Image (cartoon, rainbow, N blue to C red):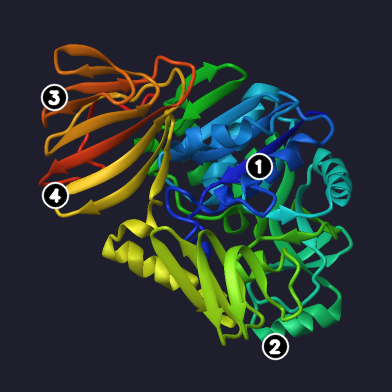
Amino acid sequence: MQLIPTILCGGSGSRLWPVSREQHPKPFIRLQDNQSLLQKAFIRGALLSDVAEVLTVTNRDLFFKTQDEYRPVNTRKVKLTYILEPFGRNTAPAVAAAALEVARAHGPDAILLILAADHLIADQGAFAEAVNQATVLAASGKIVAFGIQPTSPETGYGYIEADGNTVVKFVEKPSAEVAMRYLASGRFLWNSGMFCFAAGTMLSEMAKHCPDILASVTTCLANSSVAKGDGYAQLELNAADFASAPDISIDYAVMEKTDCAAVVPCRIGWSDIGSWDAIGELSQPDEQGNRVDGQALLHDVSNCYIQSKERMVGAVGINNLVIIDTPDALLVADRARAQDVKHVYAKLKAQGHETHKLHRTVHRPWGNYTVLEEGSRFKIKRIVVNPGASLSLQMHHHRSEHWIVVSGMAKIINGELDLLIATNESTYIPAGHKHRLENPGVVSLILIEVQSGEYLGEDDIVRYQDVYGRV
């Protein structure tokens, strides 16, 4: 039996702002052991028995970032396949694309294990046993949900009423009073959002219950581009076709309608890490109930979670707060209102404020850049280009750039000129000039870029050639 762990990596993680951003969403958040949630999801799936490959469905803009996350943890050299969405369309279209691709590559009997990229599971052994139970049910034609034995009357999760492995019904997120009744009854499980099924079973049920989704995604895959690299393949979904796919979850599209639903009740140390309070609970408190990740000095402080990786935080006379400090944004919230951080994120997005989308340090396929300072008509960046990597051949309409190499050697196209710029040397690129930056060396290239002009937005770029397919 071939098992295909399928990781759904999307969303914004708005409740974990300011660390989570649109271009650095929740799966990429690193915990105190320096592993990201996405890396943990990959390891969780890759360690299972009979894994034929790991399939990941993610946004096109997150592809290279996802590759970077997998590279250090794919020690078993598991084959990787990526399905790249041009934009989010909820979980039903993502599952349809995964099932279609797995059926094509491995046959309709291959088993998909749908995993969220941003959950945490503490007990790998119990998880593997639950997967074993689920694959047996999936092989018999069931679509299996993983139901978590509840430990508290949570109102933030959907529930499954179950009788053994039989699903009685799926229910929405309840009120506190209803959640207490669910917990007391012993018949209800948290809906983890993880599923297991044969590719052919899911496709058959989608044809019955959401044929519009299946038809849209089938057409989309037929018109999508395919590329292969060293140990991986990528399918880039056609944007025009994908736009016609309804924006709906797999729960609504299939699970609440199918007669094939089953459930595996399990205790696997599961958490969806849905708030800063949940992240705080992952570490041990001090005698006053405080948890600190980073640098903080506390005086008369209790029951607080403080994260500050780059600056010292001083706190005096406070209780029950979350304080999250990043170089360009600070969050202060009542721990009891940690779920409401999403409203701050939504307002920032509505205002078009940069802090909903990007950090000061932004990762690119070729390396990264950090915004050091910006003001009216100028911006200063620190740029790091990986060995052998190059930026696109590009042009800016509204800004000029000065490049000063501080470490390494830069190979530069500047208009009609081909240049080699060594440490402590520089070049000037006027607006309207085609240019490219490349690192021909074996160590990282580090330079300072000073931009000046009437408009300095990242969208002022025309790409002519790009080795990463971004033209």
Q: Label for residue 433?
A: 3
At mark 2, the secondary structure is: helix
Q: Are marks 3 and 4 in contact (CB under 8 Å)?
A: no
Q: Label for residue 116?
A: none
Comes first in the chain, label 4 or label 1: 1
Q: Is 275 rendered above or below residue 83?
A: below
Q: State the quadrant of the N terminus.
A: top right
Distance between the Cα atoms at labels 1 and 2?
37 Å
Q: Which residue is mark 4?
A: 377
Residue 245 spot, x, y in % from top left: 44, 45
Q: Is 455 rendered above or below residue 469?
A: below
Q: Are marks 3 and 1 in contact (CB under 8 Å)?
A: no
- Judged by depth in the image, the label closer to the viewer, 4 or 1, is 4
Q: Which residue is mark 1?
A: 39
Q: State the quadrant of the C terminus.
A: top left
Comes first in the chain, label 2 or label 3: 2
Q: Which residue is mark 2?
A: 177
- Judged by depth in the image, the label closer to the viewer, 3 or 1, is 3
At mark 4, the secondary structure is: loop
